[in-house]
Image (tube, rainbow, N blue to C red):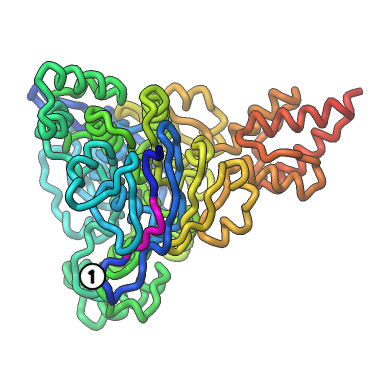
Amino acid sequence: MDITFEKVDYTYQANSPFEHKALDSMSFHLPSGSFTAIVGHTGSGKSTLIQHLNGLIRPTNGKVRIGDYVLEPKKKPKHAKALREKVGIVFQYPEHQLFEETVEKDIAFGPRNFGVPEQEIQKRVAESARAVGLGEDLLKRSPFELSGGQMRRVAIAGILAVRPRVLVLDEPTAGLDPRGQKEIMDMFYRIHKEQQLTTLLVTHSMEDALAYADHVLVLDKGKKYMEGTPVEVFSQREALQQVQLDVPEMFQFLLKASDQFGKPLAYQGQDVERLAEQLAALAGDRDE
Amino acid sequence: MHAIEFRNVSFRYEEDQPYVLRNVSFQVETGEWLAIIGHNGSGKSTIAKLMNGLLFPSEGEIFINGIPLTEENIWEIRSQVGMVFQNPDNQFVGTTVRDDVAFGLENRGVPRTEMMERITSSLEQVRMHDYLLHEPYRLSGGQKQRVAIAGVLAISPRVIILDEATAMLDPLGRKEILDTVHRVQAEQQIGLITITHDLNEVMQAERVLVMNNGEVWMTTVPRELVKKQTELQQIGLDVPFVSQLAHALQKLGVPLTEEPIDHEELLDTLWTLHSRK
């Protein structure tokens, strides 16, 4: 589903001493099937932005389009429930939202709420559990007996079982160990491809933005500060530092190495091994 | 005297359940920064909860400033061990940022004038002083965490424990918090324990304790730790970018004599090799 923001403003507690403009004339377009990383320092408007995506809040001014759904100021959205079925949001620490007696029941809660027939629910529970890598033996267990990483997978399976077309991920790897982080991100990327979802990833990890996204949206003070492919955005270190962000470590290192050796070293999608080869060649070079 | 000492500590929730921690021993010195790392479920957070008496050892003993931790002296001990948890939403009580930081001080009967000073200085240290009258629940995750850290700094503890406290912050916020607690730790000679998955954070600590399946896997210094890339990956962890790069260079036969701790060290070594040719 295409997502378009047209000059969206969002003001918290308007006409009060606490009035705060969280989104300021925000415009962008994300084509169906894209994987977008949304980055910005704390308080830049990322959370407010994603709450618009399933109609949890409506713009104060401007328009949000998600596929055929339109969110406008003051008009109650006509098909809010249908929109929420299409847009799955994985909030931070989604495992805190688990509540059912068994993993199976927890995964089934979403689709049941949307009136999916019982037989179909069973199919989706099995399918979603498989997609997030939860073994069948876990389905009858209490989610609260599982490890943190497994609990998070249960929560994510519950969202996938609704079969969203847009997947919004708010810092989905927070609190996981390095292996768990990679596993979860690889899993989302695979699901994104297999189910041809439109994915939005809110992240502080520039590494993840580089590794998984095809588009990066940089926010600052509620405004769109920059957008482009990861390589376009991460080629502008100074501009990013001005809004308290930085480039991935690979880019940082390449800049420093270019300085040290007086030779430009660009990012060309190289991994650590390839970079080592380049550096070995540089270090081995004779000064003529 | 050690700020904190664990002596053969084991822990399990119930007698018929498996041990979450087995025979854990380590010390944290006054003025020292110890990082604790380990995969999810390795026992890191259980250690944190044992350190300020939220849990008590099933076996073994814990000493805080040389005093054995017991159910009788727990309240006294808690004023010496300040703890900041992963999720700031679970640790707010005040209706304003100021009241929230005041809570710990009121509990300890700090006089009003001193209380005001401590609130101001601790909020300034985490750069949240402009938010004195804001409602904590309206702050963003990172801002909340800074207020929680201010609350801990205000009670001037002997040891500060950050249990994944920077996990939800942006990179700059993370750096600010670490610089702040590190500065305070050095100035006031308190112990700092950071429980973390952030590898670059680990590299800044003086020592590292690696947990694996409830046991101490290794206690070492960062520079020694990163030599064990393969072994760390096997237990769900990893080494920082610069160590991965150094190891890839070594595989190509580039003679690196010492493990680089940051980008600059690696580049200096490479430059020296280049210039010698």
Q: Nearer the viewer, residue B85 or B209?
A: B209
Q: Disc 1: which chain? A: A
Q: Position of residue A206 (x, y in %)?
A: 48, 40
Name the residue furthest bottom.
A119
Q: Position of residue A210 (x, y in %)?
A: 53, 43
Relative to A234, A222 lies left or right? left
Residue B237 position (above or below residue A231) = below
Q: Nearer the viewer, residue A211 or A179?
A: A179
Residue at 52%, 22% (x, y): give it. A238
Q: Position of residue B266 (x, y in %)?
A: 69, 34
Give residue A17's quadrant in the image: top left
Q: Which SS class for mark 1? A: helix
Give residue B142's quadrant in the image: top left
Q: Which residues are magenta?
A: B6-11
Q: Is residue B170 visible?
A: yes
Residue A68 position (above or below residue A277) = below
Say how many tags the image has.
1
Residue at 22%, 59% (x, y): give it. A97
Residue at 25%, 77% (x, y): give it. A121
The residue that label 1 is drawn on is A106
